[in-house]
């Protein structure tokens, strides 16, 4: 399961565990992106995203975290990651790429789409409001390599978590407790302190 994981949240974890169960997977490997080419600005440092992913997955013996993209300098394409995993695991291992249904449509924009589909089957988790029929329609050639997975409605996104932290809203129960703690300790996603507040104060005092 690839992702920016900025931060990892219960939507990711529910999708991973459901895929493990529905497809009888031996292991779910979380692969945090190195330098994401689709989200070039404002992504947290890789080591923070990696550590949060480790913290969040530690309690599940079937979950593991890979540094395969983090340790590879420069932009990593999914096809390169899958090639590496395939050569590590050998031909006999069945490899699935778990994504949200929204992300699976990006296969269309990935280079080497045919090879990507040859290297791994896809499991697309549905998110609230997602049109499953449309997805299958838009990926006609992929049908036998693409599995759709219904997961409980979890309208959680990392974007929403970051916005909540920035405005001081609680994120407990949306992400694992260890991630709540880590974010608080590292001060991630908090708005820049002081300077704007100071300016407002002095402007007020002057008028
Ligand atoms: P952002 O809001 O920054 O885009 P995100 O919540 O979508 O973050 P990503 O790290 O981009 O998280 O997602 C990694 C993978 O997990 C993607 O395939 C995405 O579609 C999937 N995913 C994200 N949120 C959920 C969720 N609530 N339920 C199921 N799958 C999800
Ligand atoms: Mg996303």
Image (cartoon, rainbow, N blue to C red):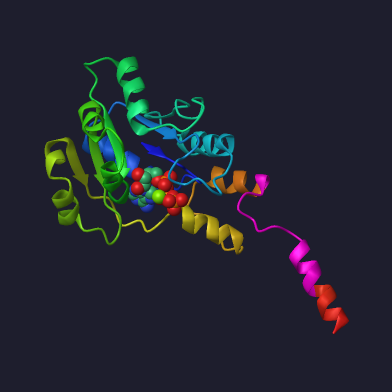
Is 168 placed above or below 98 here? below
Image quadrant in which the C terminus is located? bottom right
- Front position in the image: 80 or 102: 80
Is 193 on the left or on the right of 136, as rendered? Answer: right
In the rendering, at what x and y percent does residue 66 appear? 44, 27
Image quadrant in which the N terminus is located? top left
Is 107 on the left or on the right of 61, as rendered? Answer: left
Res 88 visible: yes
In the rendering, at what x and y percent does residue 7 appear? 51, 46
Number of numbered discs visible in the structure rendering? 0
In the rendering, at what x and y percent does residue 99 appear? 31, 42
Is 19 placed above or below 188 here? above
Q: Does the magenta stretch include residue 23?
A: no
Is 127 placed above or below 149 here? below
- Front position in the image: 169 or 61: 169
Residue at the far right in the pictured view: 206
- Front position in the image: 26 or 196: 196
Is 27 placed above or below 14 here? above
- Residue drawn at x 32%, y 22% as measured from the top left: 83
Res 14 visible: no
* Residue 115, quarter of picture: top left
Magenta-drawn segment: 185-200
Is 160 on the left or on the right of 2, as rendered? Answer: right
* Residue 148, quarter of picture: top left
Q: Does the magenta stretch include residue 192?
A: yes
């Amino acid at each position: 399961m690839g992702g920016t994981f900025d931060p990892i949240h219960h939507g990711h974890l529910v999708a991973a565990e459901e895929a493990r169960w529905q497809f009888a997977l031996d292991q779910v490997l979380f692969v945090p992106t190195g330098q994401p080419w689709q989200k070039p600005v404002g992504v947290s440092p890789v080591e923070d995203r990696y550590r949060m992913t480790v913290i969040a997955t530690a309690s599940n013996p079937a979950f593991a975290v890979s540094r395969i993209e983090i340790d590879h300098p420069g932009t990593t394409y999914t096809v390169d990651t899958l090639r590496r995993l395939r050569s590590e695991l050998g031909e006999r291992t069945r490899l699935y790429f778990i994504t949200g249904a929204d992300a699976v449509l990006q296969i269309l924009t990935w280079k080497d789409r045919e090879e990507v589909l040859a290297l791994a089957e896809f499991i697309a988790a549905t998110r609230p409001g997602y049109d499953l029929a449309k997805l299958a329609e838009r990926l006609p050639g992929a049908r036998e390599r693409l599995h759709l997975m219904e997961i409980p409605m979890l309208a959680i996104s990392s974007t929403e978590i970051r916005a909540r932290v920035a405005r001081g809203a609680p994120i407990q129960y949306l992400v694992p407790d260890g991630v709540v703690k880590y974010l608080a300790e590292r001060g991630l996603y908090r708005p820049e302190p002081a300077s704007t507040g100071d300016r407002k104060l002095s402007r007020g005092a002057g008028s």
